[in-house]
């Protein structure tokens, strides 16, 4: 409230990439509700609605204090009729009817369970639900043939649905570092994704690998993966090779956020630390059956040539909405095309190079936002 005792009217810039959004969120009930609606829309393959709710949530995340009445939201961007209705409901009743009943719905619960399986997306989950499959038991009994990723997803379901801690991310980082320097001395690894933004936990651990000499990184991924495999660190991996140069669409094709780096989606077998074994760590005879001294952790590895490193780092640090908004800003406000590989100026008809994230923000005419403030 201001000096006159009136509620503060907030002001927030239009694009999420113009805002500093830390993890210090003053409106968690509202943003949680909007994020759930976004998730539900995405799981139902209504991506447009999903983005609308994500944008609305990112406006609320940017506010310096809790919202207390609707008049404070006057003039804020990205708040559609539907989002405003949900916010009003929460301000008046403490919760949103729509969100609460969605959470209870059989369809939402089934979508959550099935897409909680690594390798299962919204399309597959929807097909299974229409066949009456709502649980992992029903999936098993259905006799559906699962692909390799989905088999690993079912096998390690509980582990992969338990958040990865910062300590576990560090432990994975040490292993990846060892692998990388063993197969190519001088190569460098950088933690990206949510952990680089300062999140205390995540659904996976993301790393970007490069070498200061252009070209030395070629073929690196398969060597790193072979090393990890030979040491028994991999429960699953799927490596895709770099398809950037062979693409006919040109490097900075803005329509897709899929980049074309050499990459590996994997599941690590991570040894538990003694204290994490907890009461299970007692004498052998008191250990519960099925106890194991390791856990499965999702890890994403990406290899980038040094010339594209800044773009790759920016593109893999997230958040997903922040990335989407950066690309939208580039296209709509600057007539540029941004990808995880490059930045193309459509007016000058040339690529703008960069060796740091700061330089890319500069090309885009944006104030630099550090990773810890990209939590849109
Ligand atoms: P979490 O803690 O849940 O892992 P996160 O922000 O790290 O959160 P990720 O899904 O790991 O989320 O994605 C990290 C970043 O990598 C995001 O910015 C995303 O845009 C980018 N990314 C993920 N998958 C791809 C892909 N297939 N192609 C290009 N970029 C991707
Ligand atoms: Mn991640
Ligand atoms: Mn990831």
Image (cartoon, helix red, strand yellow):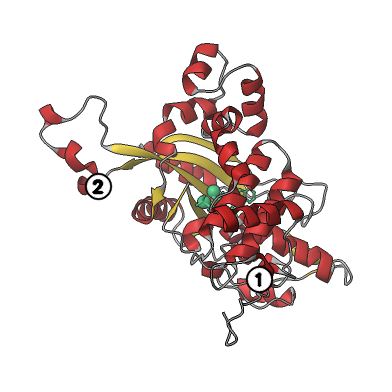
In terms of sequence position, does the residue under pointer 2 or pointer 1 come before the other? 1
In percent of the image, x 52 and y 34: which residue is there?
A: 116
Give the residue at x 50% y 54%.
Answer: 207
Closer to viewer: mark 2 or mark 1:
1
The residue carrying mark 2 is 273
From the top left corner, tell me how far across and down residue 119 is, in percent. Answer: 56, 32
Helix, strand or loop at label 2? It is loop
Q: Quadrant of the N terminus?
A: bottom right
Q: Position of residue 195 (x, y in %)?
A: 46, 58
Mark 1 lies on residue: 72
Residue at image point 61% right, 79% down = 6
Q: Is residue 222 left or right of residue 43?
A: left
Establish if 123 lies above or below 30: above
Q: Quadrant of residue 81?
A: bottom right
Looking at the picture, does residue 358 appear above or below residue 277? below
Tally the numbered discs. Answer: 2
- Mark 2 vs mark 1, CA separation in Å: 48 Å
Q: Classify 10 Å Cα crowding around label 1: few (below 14), some (14-19), many (20 and above).
A: some
Is the CB of mark 1 within 8 Å of ligand 1?
no
Q: Residue at x 60, y 86 (%)?
A: 4
- On screen, residue 54 versus residue 272, left or right, reads right
Residue 328: give x, y in percent of width and height.
77, 61
The secondary structure type at the circle numbered 1 is helix
Task: Report x, y in % for residue 15.
Answer: 72, 67
Residue 86 got which mark?
A: none
* Residues at discs 2 and 1 in contact (Cβ within 8 Å): no
Please tell me how crowded label 2 is: few (under 14), some (14-19), or many (20+) other residues with Cα within 10 Å. few
């Amino acid at each position: 409230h201001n000096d006159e005792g009136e509620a503060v009217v907030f002001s927030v810039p239009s694009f999420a990439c113009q805002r500093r959004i830390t993890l210090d969120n003053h409106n968690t009930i509202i943003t949680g509700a909007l994020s759930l609606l976004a998730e539900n829309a995405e799981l139902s393959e209504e991506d447009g609605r999903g983005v609308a709710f994500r944008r609305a949530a990112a406006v609320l995340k940017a506010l310096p204090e809790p919202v207390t009445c609707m008049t404070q939201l006057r003039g804020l961007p990205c708040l559609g009729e539907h989002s405003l209705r949900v916010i009003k409901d929460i301000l008046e009743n403490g919760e949103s009817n729509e969100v609460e009943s969605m959470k209870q719905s059989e369809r939402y619960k089934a979508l959550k369970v099935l897409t909680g399986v690594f390798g299962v997306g919204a399309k597959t989950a929807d097909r299974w639900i229409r066949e009456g499959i709502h649980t992992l038991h029903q999936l098993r009994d259905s006799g559906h043939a699962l692909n390799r990723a989905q088999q690993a997803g079912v096998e390690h379901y509980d582990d992969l649905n338990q958040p990865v801690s910062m300590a576990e991310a560090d432990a994975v980082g040490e292993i990846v570092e060892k692998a990388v320097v063993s197969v190519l001395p001088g190569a460098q690894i950088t933690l990206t994704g949510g952990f680089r933004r300062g999140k205390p936990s995540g659904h996976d651990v993301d790393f970007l690998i490069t070498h200061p000499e252009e070209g030395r990184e070629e073929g690196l991924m398969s060597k790193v993966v072979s090393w990890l495999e030979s040491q028994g660190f991999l429960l699953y991996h799927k490596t895709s090779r770099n398809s950037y140069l062979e693409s006919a669409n040109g490097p900075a094709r803005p329509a897709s956020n899929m980049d074309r780096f050499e990459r590996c989606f994997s599941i690590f077998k991570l040894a538990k630390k003694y204290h994490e074994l907890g009461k299970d760590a007692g004498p052998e005879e008191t250990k519960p059956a099925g106890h194991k001294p390791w856990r499965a952790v999702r890890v994403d590895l990406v290899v980038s040539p040094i010339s594209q490193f800044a773009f790759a780092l920016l593109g893999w640090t997230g958040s997903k909405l922040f990335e989407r908004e950066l690309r939208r800003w580039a296209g709509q406000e600057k007539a540029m095309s941004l990808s995880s590989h490059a930045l193309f100026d459509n007016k000058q008809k040339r690529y703008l190079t960069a060796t740091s994230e700061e330089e890319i923000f500069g090309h885009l005419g944006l104030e630099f936002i550090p990773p810890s403030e990209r939590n849109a």
